Amino acid sequence: MMGVPVSSQSSSEFPPTRQMMTTPTLESTNDDFLIAQPGEPIVNITPFTARQKVSGYVGYNISHMMGGDEPSLVFSKGRLIWRVPIIFTRPHEGILGIVGQIDVDARTGRLIVTPDLAKQVQANAEQILARLTPATAG
């Protein structure tokens, strides 16, 4: 196999190597946060999946008259989470109000549930029911 000696070729005939390329430096401030390393997904869990997970958890562990609503993507305590409101509903009235929230890790899908969540949610639901007038209560 005949080849051309590397030393006889000019550098303009080859594409630049990584060492030859210069990359611009990005300025950063104290307010900057690294969201994802190169090649790392920003989120693995969709908002739809986060809402489904919360609805399943709440329906099974707290009340079948509650479920997840539309989540918001939030950066909290060094990670991205889906913050899913818990809504309280009644068959003939529809949504009565928001009674709590559950965070879902946007990368792993793990629910972040506080120990007293069920008590807080039930107390909030009772407050909503107490505000209903007799005409709307049934």
Image (spheres, rainbow, N blue to C red):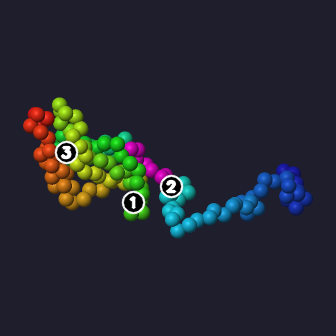
Residue linked to disc 2: 40
Residue linked to disc 3: 60
- Whether residue 95 is situated above or below residue 57 in the rendered picture: above
Residue lying farthest to the top in this orientation: 92
Amino acid type indicated by mark 3: Tyr
Does the stretch in magenta take in 44? yes
Disc 2 element: loop
Mark 2 and mark 1: span between their CA atoms? Answer: 18 Å
Residue 8 horizontal/vertical position (percent): 90, 59
Instruction: Give the mark nearest the N terminus, 3 or 2.
Output: 2
Q: Which residues are magenta?
A: 41-47
Labels 3 & 1 near each other (Cβ < 8 A): no
Instruction: Give the mark nearest the N terminus, 3 or 1.
Output: 3
Q: Nearer the viewer, residue 136 or 93?
A: 136
Does the stretch in magenta take in 127? no
Q: Could you tell whether 18 is left or right of 111 in the image?
A: right
The C terminus lies in quadrant:
top left
